[in-house]
Amino acid sequence: MKTLIKNGKIVTKNNQTTTCDLWLEDGIIAGIGKDFSTITFDQEYDAKNQLITPGLVDVHVHLREPGFTYKETIKDGTKAAARGGYTTVCAMPNLNPVPDTVEKFEQVKAIIERDAVVKVLQYAPITEELRSERLTDQKGLKAVGAFAFTNDGVGVQSAGTMYLAMKEAAKNKMALVAHTEDESLLFGGVMHKGEISEKLQLPGILSATESSQIARDLILAEETGVHYHVCHVSTKESVRVIREAKQAGVHVTAEVSPHHLILIDENITEDHGYWKMNPPLRANEDRQALIEGLLDGTIDCIATDHAPHGFEEKNQSFLKSPFGIVGSETAFQLIYTHFVETGKFTLEQVINWMAVKPAEIFGIKAGTLMIGQPADVTIFDLENEEKIDDEKFASLGVNTPFTGWPVKGTTLMTFVDGQLVYNKED
Ligand SMILES: [Zn+2]
């Protein structure tokens, strides 16, 4: 099958754009250029005035299956990813059962193989049942395709357990990916500790709940030589200690979520679950530090932490609602609208943080538009203005505070291995 995407705009070095055609064949990019008139294609798409990017890569999503299919399924979660322009997602293992053995891991893989519409790389847990006690069989899980190890959703509470897990991961040449949260510093918190938590009379989460565990882990990462990746960095202190560790030569990488780049606790106007996420929305000075961290390379990439929940469970107060918001279908539009349209980031930087870098830091074969690479390609309309509309979501989750926000940067088409997996017109 030969596919031609005609007349699209591609971002090249120094944020320049060039108009060109893309020839996809047998799952790979067979040609990029302007001189394909002698070739007969099976199908052609006109991308005139539209942006063509490498398919986006999201290293942090929750697909909720098996165990929580009322929140999301692998089928719907990957359809949501495709609708957001993503062609590769890395799925968290806080499932039921937790895929902490080879057998349970293979059960998740079988559903992915059957139902996923984009590429899914599945994480395995660091410890059994995500309890900070016994390590999983890293070697065995790697052999059946585990992408990396993480207990996302909870932090690894014991330094000793983390040390042993890092030593083992370094030996197995696998990344250790951490949701950092010291539960002894949680004090029942549900939102960032500050003026807003006081005003709403809700228990606050200290910045140190996150940053102190990152500081601990960075020292352990230095000791063990592991590739340590920090999930959803949210505080200025976290950015500072990661920056210092990078300068000291520690193999650390980090991600930030769109909501922490755009929202702060002052935006929370009501005691409603749609504002509840973990880590919480922080102060403006934290948000500024995250932006600086991205710009100076302390933070490597943007990841959504797509965390769908049932409507009823999120449609209640902070104290009752679970943590998390959906993100796959809003990430590119929000980042494009808030940072590229306003001149704070270039399009090249955004593509770098949402496709190139996440692939690069984990060695995923994705994130570039180059001849011979997988034909994972997205077409965006940067001019179309619309409002974020949860009724159009492919995800089962509608839990987001961004509903109704005006945005540009609509996904028109998403191709995975040359196959059209999302088309706005369908
Ligand atoms: Zn997390």
Image: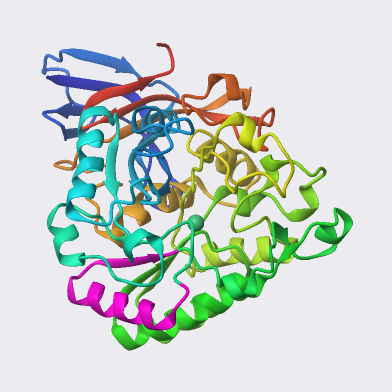
Determine if residue 245 is in view. Answer: yes
Residue 375 in view: no
Q: Residue 49 in the image: state x and y as whole percent.
A: 45, 24
In depth, the one of 391 and 186 nearer the eye is 186
- What residue is at 11 percent from the left and 29 percent from the top? 26
The residue that appears at 54% across and 20% down in the rendered structure is 392
What x and y, as percent, mark residue 9? 39, 32
Res 181 → quadrant: bottom right
Q: Quadrant of the C terminus?
A: top left
Q: Is residue 345 left or right of residue 368?
A: right
Taking depth in this image into account, of 365 and 281 the one nearest to the observer is 281
Query: On the rendered image, what quadrant is the N terminus found in?
Result: top left
Please tell me whether residue 199 is drawn above or below residue 269 in the rendered image: below
Which of the colour schemes (rainbow, by chain, secondary structure, one colour) is used? rainbow
When asked about the image quadrant of residue 404, the answer is top right
Q: Nearer the viewer, residue 398 or 23?
A: 398
- Residue ID at (27%, 47%): 121
> Magenta segment, which residues?
157-178
Q: Is 90 part of what is drawn in magenta?
A: no
Q: Residue furthest right?
A: 199
Q: Identify the residue at horizontal 47%, vertical 37% (top origin).
A: 328
Rendered position, 188 above or below 112: below
Q: Position of residue 75 (x, y in %)?
A: 34, 28
Tell me, yes or no, whether the highlighted magenta stretch contains residue 173. Answer: yes
Horizontal and vertical percent for residue 410? 51, 27
